[in-house]
Amino acid sequence: MIVATELWLAAPTPKQRVFMGWLLLLLTAGLFFCLSRGGWVGALVGIILLMAMRREFKTLVKVTCAFVPLICICWYFLPDKSKDYTTGLSAKNENIQMRYNSVEYAKERFESNPYLGVGWGCGRSMTRRTCSG
């Protein structure tokens, strides 16, 4: 999305700018439906920084006005299960639970030998043993 935004801003002809605009809308919808909150934040910050560096603040406001309805429409068509996944930050969420498991595993490894550690990639992973010895 960031590269497409730069290509849209740098398009030499109005025809190319319209084409890149439609492509940018398509990429935005695709990023939205992949349910990657980190991807959303990264794209948003990248585009804001890109437009700030180019001093395109009026364009940023116009793009925001165009993309807010698109995001609302995409949210409407998102299945309820996906809406719960993207907005649910409870410990019941599988993604959050795996992060808790990872932190607990790291704490176990540290407590087993806080001075020397267990080595690079050695020790028992959460699912299987990763090195012999």
Image (cartoon, helix red, strand yellow):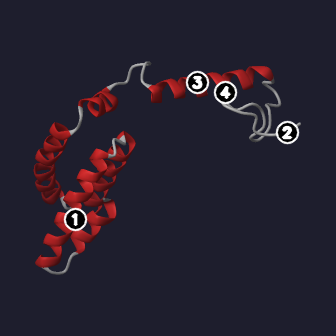
Q: Dot 1, crowdedness within 10 Å: few (<14), some or many (≥20)?
A: some
Q: Earlier in the sequence, mark 1 or mark 3?
A: 1
- Do labels 2 and 3 touch, CB within 8 Å? no
Q: Is residue 130 left or right of 20 when viewed as pictured? A: right
> Mark 4 sits on what residue?
106
Above or below for 120 versus 116: below
> Mark 2 sits on what residue?
132
Snapshot quadrant of residue 128: top right
Q: Earlier in the sequence, mark 2 or mark 4?
A: 4
Q: Amino acid at mark 2?
A: Ser
Residue 49 percent across, percent down from the top left: 31, 55
Q: Amino acid at mark 3?
A: Asn
Q: Amino acid at mark 1?
A: Leu
> Mark 3 sits on what residue?
101
* Image point (11%, 52%), residue name: 66
Label 4 sits on a secondary structure element that is helix
Q: Which of label 2 and label 3 is nearer to you?
A: 2
